[in-house]
Image: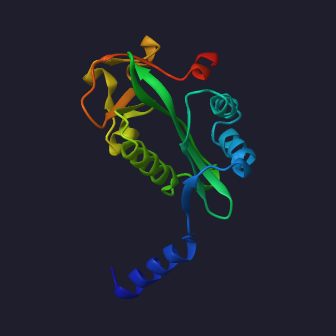
Amino acid sequence: MAGGETRWRVAAVLATVRVMLIRRETPADIDAIRTVTDLAFKNGPEAPLIDWLRADPGWIPELSLVAVSEGVIGHVVCTRGYLGDMPALGLGPISVHPDHQRNGVGSALMHAVLGGAEARGEHAVTLLGDPRYYSRFGFRLASEFGITPPVAEWEPYFQARLFEPVPGGAFRYAEPFNRL
């Protein structure tokens, strides 16, 4: 590639880069989180789920994070779940505004929430999603650790990231997930 073409491509990329901040959600973000979540999930049950989770004892405010770039463009949350009797986390929903998908927003949110979970001394984080995507964040099929999902049919997509060894067993999400 010629030097001029390289400089042109770098300039084109830099022209589209915006500053993005990952921070804890505030009450002022709630409406924007609902909007982003509805857009990302095409008005699925995820936005009401987040509202239900906020009212649940399993809500962990420091693990509800927003990505901000001229407004809220993404959100992720981890809530208290249990692996048998041991506290663990359930990750999700994670949502990114469709105009900002495939630009690293989701990855930044994942790294931030996992870093926050580890810093809190959490044992494990579970999620339901595409193993090809979430493996880049250290997730493996939960069955490899002897962890079973709440619904048996989820097994091919139910994953865990361990921060320390944990006993196997059945995972339970925060109660609002049972309403879905």
Residue closer to the observer: 179 or 141? 179
Q: Is residue 49 above or below residue 97?
A: above
Q: Nearer the viewer, residue 144 or 80?
A: 80
Answer with left or right where residue 145 lies relative to residue 89: left
The single residue placed furthest to the bottom in the displayed view is 4
Write the residue at 27% across / 25% down.
Answer: 166
Residue displayed at 43% across by 47% down: 116
Q: Residue 93's image quarter?
A: top right
Residue located 29% across and 18% down the image: 168
The answer to which of 16 and 50 lies nearer the viewer is: 50
Determine the image quadrant of residue 55. Answer: top right
Task: Say whether residue 13 is left or right of residue 160.
Answer: right
Find residue 64 and report its horizontal and vertical position in percent: 56, 43
Q: Nearer the viewer, residue 71 or 153?
A: 71
Q: Is residue 150 left or right of residue 25?
A: left
Q: Quadrant of residue 134?
A: top left
Q: Position of residue 125 (x, y in %)?
A: 40, 33
Can residue 13 be seen in the rendering of this structure? yes
Residue 36 in the image: above or below residue 18: above
Image quarter in which the N terminus is found = bottom left
Whether residue 128 can be seen here: no
Residue drawn 62% across the image and 27% down it: 56
